[in-house]
Amino acid sequence: MSTPNLFLVYVSDAEAATAFYRDLFEIEPTFVSPRYVAFEVAPGVLFALWTGRPEHAVPSTPRTSELGLMVPGGGSAVDEIFARWTATDVRVIEEPHDDVFGRTFVVADPDGNLIRVAPVD
């Protein structure tokens, strides 16, 4: 059976979004074009930014999904990432708190796409 291997996020400015995610996740893109940028996040798995559907990257578009970063180390690791990211002026949507799956917080990229950090399940 096939499994998803491409996670696509709509952005309004590929260059700005590339810089945001490169700095936030501390990774380099593996493919760059004017409207599509891909980061290999695991062997054969891509996280990509795309400006091909600009109507999806406007403030009025509901954000009904999240990118997830699951980190080892429990709540203290989550709090450390929050401190590091908020020092870079990232927009906070949810402050760190404890939820059913552990310590978590949510930030947003410049287009309002949500990014959740939580401990490894």
Image (cartoon, rainbow, N blue to C red):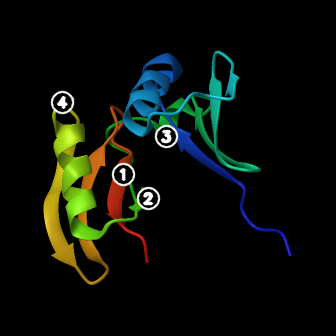
**Do the residues bearing badges 2 and 3 touch, measured as CB atoms within 8 Å?**
no
Gap in Å between the C-alphas at discs 3 and 1?
Answer: 17 Å
Q: Nearer the viewer, residue 58 or 42?
A: 42
- Callout 2: helix, strand or loop? strand
The answer to which of marks 4 and 3 sits earlier in the sequence is 3
Classify the position of the N terminus by image quarter.
bottom right
The answer to which of marks 1 and 4 sits earlier in the sequence is 4
Residue name at image x 17 percent, y 75 percent:
98
Pointer 4 residue: 89
Gap in Å between the C-alphas at discs 2 and 3?
Answer: 20 Å
Pointer 2 residue: 68
Residue name at image x 22 percent, y 68 percent:
75
Gap in Å between the C-alphas at discs 4 and 3?
Answer: 24 Å
Task: Determine crowd level at label 2: few under 14, some 14-19, many 20+ residues with C-alpha closer than 10 A.
Answer: few
Pointer 1 residue: 115
73 relative to 85, above or below: below
The answer to which of marks 2 and 1 sits earlier in the sequence is 2
Point out which mark residue 56 bears.
3
Gap in Å between the C-alphas at discs 4 and 2?
Answer: 19 Å
**Which amino acid, by three-letter code, is at mark 1?**
Ile
User: How many marks overall?
Assistant: 4
Q: Nearer the viewer, residue 107 or 26?
A: 26
In the rendered image, residue 92, in percent from the top left (x then y), is placed at: 18, 46
**Closer to the observer: label 2 or label 3?**
2
- Callout 3: helix, strand or loop? helix
